[in-house]
Image: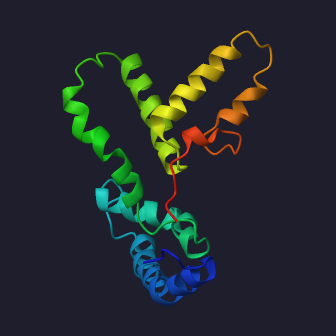
Amino acid sequence: MTKGKSDEEILNNRKASVKPLVDSFFAWIKPIYESGELDKSSESFKAVQYAVNQESYLRKFLDNAIIPLDNNDAEQSIKAFCVGKHSWHIIDSKNGAEASAILYSIAETAKANGLKPYEYFKYALEEILKHQDDALETYIKDLLPWSTALPDSCRKQINK
């Protein structure tokens, strides 16, 4: 677990326990790619080629503590969406699906930033209505889920 650990502790742990595994993986896979033994049209070749070509990106988590080792948080945040999708026959068009995806993305971003989604949406929509005739859209930066200008009513209470 990394909760409560500093970035330095997280990176030191990754360098000690995970980096040797990553190094071993690439030491194993590069000769396979370079040998030419795999059929270039096979799925195996495509997977090996992808890993070799993306090595620098696949190693980024070793140098940046904010990058998680897995995507569990992302999967958890979309679980309710995926479970409920079979009930949503009202999303009967590409535009409906796109609108739904945008709303879910905003709601999950609000939750990730410690906001109450309903209160956040209510506040944001009311503010947008107030500014609908404005020529400039500078007010929008104050409506972003990470903005410090959002009212406390939008924020979840943190128990101390």
From the viewer's perspective, tell me whether residue 99 is left or right of residue 37. right
Of residues 158 and 112, the one drawn nearer to the viewer in this rendering: 158
Q: Where is residue 4 in the image (x, y as percent from the top left)?
A: 52, 76
Q: Residue at x 51, y 82 (%)?
A: 14
- Find residue 81 and report its image quarter: top left
Q: Look at 41% across and 79% down and name the residue there.
A: 25
Rendered location of residue 30, percent (x, y): 45, 75
Q: Is residue 68 left or right of residue 136?
A: left
In the image: residue 44, left or right of residue 131? left
| Quarter assignment of residue 98 | top left
Give how far across and how far down residue 26 sits, in percent.
46, 78
Q: As displayed, is residue 123 above or below residue 35?
A: above
Give the farthest residue toward the top.
133
Q: Nearer the viewer, residue 42 or 136?
A: 136
Q: How is the image coloured?
A: rainbow
- Left of 88 or right of it: where is 41? right
Task: Name the image quarter holding residue 145.
Answer: top right
Specify the quadrant that holds the N terminus: bottom left
Q: Which residue lies furthest to the front in this view?
A: 160
Q: Name above or below for residue 96 compared with residue 30.
A: above
Residue 151 image offset from top left, x and y in percent: 64, 38
Q: Which residue lies furthest to the left in this view?
A: 86
Decide which of 134, 58 is in the foreground and name it: 134
